[in-house]
Image: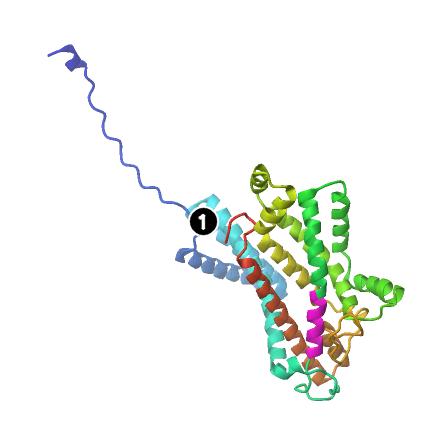
Amino acid sequence: MSIETLTEPSPAPPAPARPTPVPIRPRAVRREDVAIVVASAGSALALTWLLYERLAPLSGGIGFVIMWFALFIVTYWVVIRDIEGRFIATDKTIALSIGCVAVGLMIPLVLIIGYVIVKGIKYLNWAFFTQTQAAVGPDSPASEGGAAHAIVGTLEQVGLAMLVSVPLGIGCAVYMNEVGGRMVRPVRLFVDAMSGVPSIVAGLFIFTVWILGLGQGFSGFAAALALTILMLPTITRTSEEVLRLVPDGLREASLAVGATQWRTTWNVVLPTARSGLVTAVILGVARAIGETAPLIMTAFGAQLMNVNPFAGAQSSLPLFVYGAYVLNTTSEVARAWTGALVLMLIVLLLFLIARAVGRGGWGTGGGQR
């Protein structure tokens, strides 16, 4: 037997098989998670009742809810920590807290929308969209007359305001984010200052300059100018934030192939951020479409149809609702609720149209939807 055979090491034992790793997905919702949430909420409710109603001299529904929610979150975190560890417990507890806050914020919105629908749908008929208040008195039945003049006025005023504010707002955002220069900081400061201007101040400004100073009189266009002041800062700031989300690599690639800065902005940056810019316009319209105070001093309101926004007083749905509420009769209050419902439906329709326009574009993150 050779020396090599005697000194040859024995083969190493096979390594023990490793268990297959199971991925942990903190955001996956399982039946156990639902059961834990329900059990934590129930136990927190029982403990809150014991502490709040029996052991401590406390009272009040708001305090009870606050204490129950705090104990619910703590109980849920303790249970998840014992089952899945501290890291997963922290992640799920934060997600649960944010979800509860979101639901809490949605509840008032749903209640308001539901209440407006219940109060306004009773007298919502075709005549409300085709007739005016020309031959209707305060004591006339709520089913008589309509708000066609107010609907036309709202669409014209908001449309004119969009024609002015959308190009100015997006152009200003392009200047601050794409072009740059010495005036960027003053322009941004001016936009921020405009964001805090109350709507009544915008109406007073147009009333003083346009109606009294230039002697143009009340009109739908004057109302559109007041709404433009309110819409412009919202559209500008939101558009600027959207343009910042466009990856710099797209700009650099466009400039590398010889495109000018204007071509890059027009053909690359703006199409990439199109859906975000549509969202900016939606937020601007939502900021101004329900305003009443600036319209009182600019459009003034009317009971007759006026399709010319550049001459004569013109009504709008906010003015229609406000005027009906001020009269404070049963029929007028019912008309006010119906007008509020129609205004809400118009806002919803505008949102759907805007989302349909931006749906086929590029997302703000640079990827196509």
How many marks are shown on the rendered structure?
1
Side of 357 relative to 295 (left or right):
left
Q: Which residues are magenta?
A: 148-159
The answer to if 257 sits in the magenta stretch is no
Judged from the image, the secondary structure of the residue bearing numbered disc 1 is loop
The picture quadrant where one finds residue 13 is: top left
The image position of residue 234, as x and y in percent, is: 69, 56
Disc 1 marks which residue?
26
Given residues 163 and 145, the one toward you in this image is 163
Picture layout, residue 365 above or below residue 150: above
What kind of secondary structure does the magenta stretch mostly adopt? helix
Residue at left 36%, top 44%? 22
Amino acid under label 1? Pro
The answer to if 158 sits in the magenta stretch is yes
The image position of residue 198, as x and y in percent, is: 77, 60
Residue at left 48%, top 61%? 42
Side of 312 relative to 286 (left or right):
right
Side of 266 relative to 201 (left or right):
left
| Outermost residue to the bottom | 140
Given residues 242 and 195, the one toward you in this image is 242
Given residues 250 and 241, the one toward you in this image is 250
The image position of residue 68, as x and y in percent, is: 56, 59
Report the coloring of the rendering: rainbow
Picture layout, residue 68 above or below residue 156: above
Picture layout, residue 17 above or below residue 320: above
Side of 295 relative to 266 (left or right):
right
Picture layout, residue 341 above or below residue 181: below
Q: Can residue 250 be seen?
A: yes
Residue at left 68%, top 87%? 144
Estimate how packed mark 1 is, as few (under 14), some (14 to 19) or many (20 or more) residues with alpha carbons within 10 Å: some
